[in-house]
Image (cartoon, helix red, strand yellow):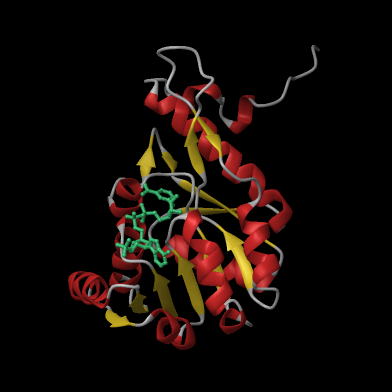
């Protein structure tokens, strides 16, 4: 697949490297040509302007801060028409009202993925890869306690969701098709909640039993 990545930071590097290694054609489009060139060289991709990376791509990863989206989509929203747009963004703010000693975050904005879809109405926006740190996506550990790491994916266009699912599989991850784009806000909330737990030293994974024990079984 032809993948355009907007941004040249941690997420661009983590996902772009894996996709390039899996045989995809990756173009890095960043506002700094030097940064785009440096990352492209590092991951075996090609550098481009933001506009050229979008024009080239079948799928575009938005790997920029949420604060950059208004400007980016204002300039390029129409260029995203017909493309799969992968939104991995998180809108975190420190939770100023958390009790002392409890590290926590809140969302600075709800439903970022839906905002992207409104600003680029002809794009096929898919939320994915926002739950975990770039270091995890960049790493090679994929199976923990016998369970393959999963990527929940929300989007309205089934074909686009399937394409992103294959991109997850290309990183040796397990895609979870998780419903329409209106549910992406829950992924965004899940991320802000679990990251707070992790920062506090609490293993978020321990909150959830395996599927086999997730529902009460009626007494015989
Ligand atoms: N890092 C993680 O672990 C992680 C995990 C999950 C989700 N995310 C989300 O993924 C997104 C990217 O995170 P990141 O960690 O990769 O960020 P990062 O390392 O800070 O890189 C951000 C990239 O966006 C570019 N950028 C910033 N403002 C811009 C603007 N106004 N217009 C165009 N480009 C702009 C930066 O360019 P300059 O260098 O020129 O500023 C940089 O290339 C964020 O929304 C973040 O919440 C991150």
Front-lying residue, 11 or 147 = 11
Q: Is residue 160 left or right of residue 21?
A: right
Q: Can residue 8 be seen in this view?
A: yes
Q: Residue at x 30, y 45 (%)?
A: 141
Report the label total: 0
Q: Where is residue 34 in the image (x, y as percent from the top left)?
A: 21, 75
Q: Position of residue 171 (x, y in %)?
A: 38, 60
Look at the image and tell me in which quarter the N terminus lies: bottom left
Look at the image and tell me in which quarter the C terminus lies: top right
Q: Position of residue 89 (x, y in %)?
A: 49, 54
199 shown above or below 186: above
Q: Can residue 154 be seen in this view?
A: no
Q: Residue at x 37, y 20 (%)?
A: 201
Q: Position of residue 94 (x, y in %)?
A: 46, 31
Q: Residue at x 44, y 87 (%)?
A: 56
Q: Quadrant of residue 101?
A: top left
Question: Quarter containing ligand 1?
Answer: bottom left
Q: Is residue 138 left or right of residue 4?
A: left
35 shown above or below 133: below
28 shown above or below 176: below
Q: Which residue is drawn at 50% across and 67% down?
A: 166
129 shown above or below 32: above
């Amino acid at each position: 697949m032809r993948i355009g990545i907007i941004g040249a930071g941690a997420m661009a590097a983590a996902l772009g490297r894996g996709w390039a290694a899996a045989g995809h054609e990756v173009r890095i489009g960043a506002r700094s040509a030097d940064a785009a060139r440096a990352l492209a060289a590092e991951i075996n991709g090609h550098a481009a302007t933001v506009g050229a990376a979008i024009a080239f791509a079948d799928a575009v990863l938005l790997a920029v801060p949420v604060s950059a989206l208004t400007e980016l989509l204002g300039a390029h929203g129409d260029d995203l028409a017909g493309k799969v747009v992968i939104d991995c963004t998180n809108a975190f703010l420190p939770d100023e009202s958390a009790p002392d000693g409890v590290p926590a975050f809140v969302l600075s904005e709800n439903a970022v993925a839906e905002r992207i879809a409104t600003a680029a109405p002809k794009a096929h926006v898919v939320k994915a890869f926002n739950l975990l740190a770039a270091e995890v996506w960049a790493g090679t550990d994929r199976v923990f306690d016998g369970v393959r790491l999963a990527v929940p994916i929300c989007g309205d266009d089934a074909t686009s969701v399937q394409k992103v699912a294959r991109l997850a599989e290309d990183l040796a991850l397990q895609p979870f098709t998780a419903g329409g784009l209106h549910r992406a806000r829950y992924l965004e909330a899940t991320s802000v909640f679990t990251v707070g737990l992790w920062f506090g030293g609490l293993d978020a994974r321990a909150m959830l039993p395996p599927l086999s024990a997730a529902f009460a079984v009626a007494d015989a």
